[in-house]
Amino acid sequence: MSVKLTKKTKNSAFWWWYNGNLTGFTHQHMQTFGFMCAMIPVIKELYKDDVHRLRSLKTYTPFFNTEPQIGSMVVGISVGLEEARANGHEEIDDEMINGIRAGLMGPLAGIGDSLIPGTYIPILLSIALGLSTDGSPLGAIFYAVTYISTMTFFMKYIFDKGYELGGRAVDVVIGEQATAFRESMVMVGTIVIGSLAASWIGVSTALKFDLGTYVLNGVEVPNILRLQDTLNGIFPNLLSLLTVLFTWYLMTKKKMSPITVMLILVAVALVGVLVGFFDPGLSY
Amino acid sequence: MQIQLWQALLLAIMASLTSVIGCLGTTYSWYTLSRPLVASLVVGLILGDVKTSIMVGAAIQVVYIALVTPGGTVSADLRAVSYIGIPLAVAAVKGANLDPASVQGAGLAVSIGALVGTVGTVMFYSTATMNLIWQQIGWKAIDKLNYRIIYLTNFVFPLISHFFIAFLPTFFITYYGTDIVANLKEWLPMEGIPMKTMFTLGSLLPAVGIGILLKQVVQNPVDLIIFFFGFTLAAALKINLVGAAFVGAMIAFLNYKIIMSKAGNKASHEEDL
């Protein structure tokens, strides 16, 4: 006798995960409860007796945490494996399922974080910021619609792939072609972020040097050297570029947290203002 | 700018919905509704000034452009940035009679947003800690196969955490705080050191957002060339962001072709042997 999950049950597992992967988050269990919620409809349909139901539910109690969107693949894989176990594949036990779950959550977290919040979101937001420069709501709407629709499609696709391929699904995300694709995507992201930095950061100095006066057409003109103009002559927006490199250096080479770096910038701003390097030059 | 009771209530509801662990789920809440740019539209609709709100939100968004939360550690809670920081920043910018599109207007907004966001990390860690109570209940339900309690643990009980940790603080801070920041000019002169520092800081902080992203993608300093290339496109060649995305896509496409053809050569070479 073979049991096959209905499409409805598979969809409900997907949607429970989609909506609940982080809702009950604690640092102790992270996404474990979200994972169980996704597996419950599957377990209920596959097994009719409480002994098997309890055994299978307990399979999903170990700690689980990954990038939850790309992680929908692991849910798909587990659904597929659970179905195979219900059909009498005895080699599929708790140890095997949790081996795959635990083995995938690290790599998928790394890939997911670098591709989704690290690349895809910054690119979309950069474009959206460009659409919203004059206070237009267009950018916000563009981001929300594009992100939600593409991400929902991606999560469902990768869930179905996981279900179909079971443990072999791993190649789809960490195979040679996928790695080349990922590296190229990160490249687009880095280029766009470079442009974003140049368009949205405007660090400038108010420092100027009075070099006396010179005579132009018989009129005495003050000769003032503005450091900002000199720097822009070397490379446009040079100070912004240097500020970015400074934060990158502190976080990467000095292993500082973003909050520490922000505190250092508070000190830089204060000292800069005191010595007259920075001066926004405003009045009410 | 006087904020009405219903406006503060709506902001508080939005803050509850949109944490990294918010009740609308990761894709809707954390990655969409809590992003400052998207939130600024919602805040703008609530406050009745979409234009100012979006300009403020866009400036703050740059700081949090690449916020990644590896292993459940956050450097800012975006719901605090978005639904407390943006309303306060809008009130401050309007109160100081600044143009939100100017460097100074953006600078003030960014300083306020980042301050609220950093303090707001407390909200994230408190919610995660308070949820431990609900999980104690949920854990006991597993042995009894009580599915309903397991669902409640993951979806409904955490709403109580959000009520105390997001709803109440957001309500009180936005309801009473907007008045205080709107009258900034009465107690902080623009020529004074604190205000000058704040504006300067606002112009420096977006660099941290870019630095966070670079930290992930650039380990070897040589890879910075890709970033410099993007910077040059906009700074020296004046190409806009959509244009830069296409130039970037073209270069990435070439990169992909090169890697794949190398891999293909290797494979066919092995076949020959």
Image (cartoon, coloured by chain):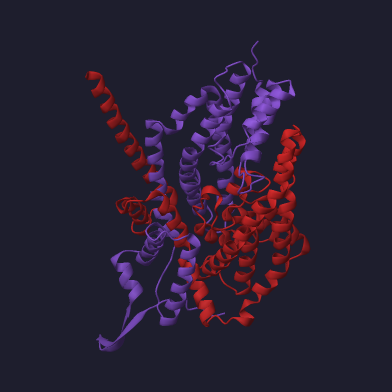
Q: Residue at x 49, y 70 (%)?
A: B201
Query: Is any part of residue B103 visible from this angle?
Result: no
Q: Is residue B271 left or right of residue B186?
A: left
Nearer to me, B234 or A161: A161
Q: Residue at x 56, y 22 (%)?
A: A92
Q: Colour of chain A?
A: purple
Residue B14 horizontal/vertical position (percent):
69, 53
Q: Is residue A238 above or below residue A25?
A: below
Q: Is residue B164 left or right of residue B219?
A: right
Placement of the N terminus of chain B among the 4 image quadrants: bottom right
Q: Is residue A89 left or right of residue B222?
A: right
Query: Is any part of residue A243 visible from this angle?
Result: yes
Q: Is residue B71 above or below residue A61?
A: below
Residue B223 horizontal/vertical position (percent):
32, 50
Quarter of the view holding residue A73: top right
Quarter of the view holding residue A209: bottom left
Q: Is residue B79 above or below residue B149?
A: below
Residue B18 horizontal/vertical position (percent):
65, 51
| Residue positioned most to the left | B273
Residue B136 horizontal/vertical position (percent):
71, 45
Total count of labels: 0
| Residue positioned most to the top | A1
Quarter of the view holding residue A230: bottom left
Placement of the C terminus of chain B among the 4 image quadrants: top left
Q: Colour of chain B?
A: red
